[in-house]
Amino acid sequence: MELLRVENLKTYFHISQGIVKAVDDVSFTLAYGQCLGLVGESGCGKTTTALSINRLLPPEGKIQSGNIYLEAVNLTALSDDEIRKRRWKEISMIFQGAMNALNPVMKIGEQIAEAVVLHQQVSHQQAWGRAKELFELVELEPDRISGYPHEFSGGMKQRAMIAMALACDPKLVIGDEPTTALDVMVQAQILNLLDKLRQNLNMGLILITHDLSILGETCDRIAVMYAGKIVEMGSTEDIYHEHMHPYTYRLLRAFPHIRGPKQMPEPIMGTPPDLIRPPSGCRFHPRCDYAKEICREEEPGMTAAGDGHAYACHFGGAFNG
Ligand SMILES: Nc1ncnc2c1ncn2[C@@H]1O[C@H](COP(=O)(O)OP(=O)(O)OP(=O)(O)O)[C@@H](O)[C@H]1O
Ligand SMILES: [Mg+2]
């Protein structure tokens, strides 16, 4: 059953230098219990997409057009007050680098309990009980609940952040680079935990990362973003093995899979474009080995490549032959 539907979302930042088209016509859906990976290089609009769903954009950021439905409710149409009531309870977010924002002089358990008290009408004692339950849920040792952040490893702190995100049983959790600062083993453990939780709690999960190689065991579907647009979307299998967009191909080679064939990572040459003045036609054309005249002139639409698999390229699969 469908939980989230993002339709033709455009989110722009209005700054003195011009208009940054950070999210420019993005559409996707997510079902209950499903995990969608949102992947792409730095600055392609992943966090802006997540902040738009949460309606947590800074003042210069504006949803220009499009709709975001959580079940039947259009989040873009809600007042600030109405959306505030839904944050944490329906949608919650694990922010990029959030574990570094834990209060160093407050017990971890207290910080979780505080999050519970803030969003639910419960006593401090009940909140502490809920914090204990959440600790168990994220597989932290119960007697650590009275510990301070400096006594926690990075992985444990991230588990505590996940516990906070789950405090009010949200339907949708968005993890923005939830494992980026962690070593590979701990990263895998955290991803496994999130995977288990979304299945057991039947919640929708959006995992945001720049590293496409880590999504394989966790995500059902993957959306690849480039310069504010989704350039390819499909099942994890489609994206890993049947990709049609040259950018997906380059991104896969930039982060070789631990279990895949041994190869040196190949960085993608050049830098992502300036989103105030994005390139004409296909936004990837200045960095694409296969670009032809049409790529400079015409923006490619989405072409279907199978059930739920689509890509935006004039020469889909060109890199194969
Ligand atoms: N407050 C802001 N004002 C102006 N531009 C912004 C603002 N926030 C983000 N941007 C721009 O919007 C674009 C998308 O940024 P966003 O943070 O969504 O990217 P991202 O994919 O999350 O990148 P990263 O992997 O580095 O976190 C970038 O060009 C960024 O510079
Ligand atoms: Mg980001």
Image: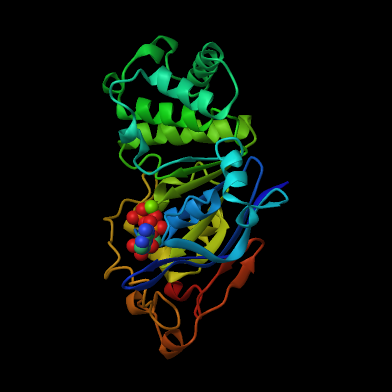
Q: Residue at x 51, y 14 (%)?
A: 124
How many numbered discs? 0
Is residue 97 depicted above or below 116 in this figure?
below
Q: Position of residue 237 (x, y in %)?
A: 55, 53
Front-lying residue, 80 or 199 = 80
Name the image quarter holding the C terminus. Answer: bottom left
Is residue 201 depicted above or below 24 in this figure?
above
Q: Residue at x 53, y 48 (%)?
A: 54
Residue 153 appears in view: yes
Q: Residue at x 41, y 42 (%)?
A: 95
Is residue 256 depicted above or below 45 in this figure?
above
Q: Position of residue 256 (x, y in %)?
A: 34, 52
Q: Quadrant of residue 189?
A: top left
Q: Determine whether, in the image, residue 133 is placed left or right of residue 271.
A: right
Front-lying residue, 230 or 26 = 26
Front-lying residue, 108 or 201 = 108
Front-lying residue, 152 or 113 = 113
Q: Residue at x 42, y 90 (%)?
A: 293
Q: Determine whether, in the image, residue 170 is placed left or right of residue 299.
A: right
Q: Position of residue 141 (x, y in %)?
A: 42, 14
Residue 185 appears in view: no
Q: Position of residue 55 (x, y in %)?
A: 52, 51
Q: How was this image coloured? A: rainbow
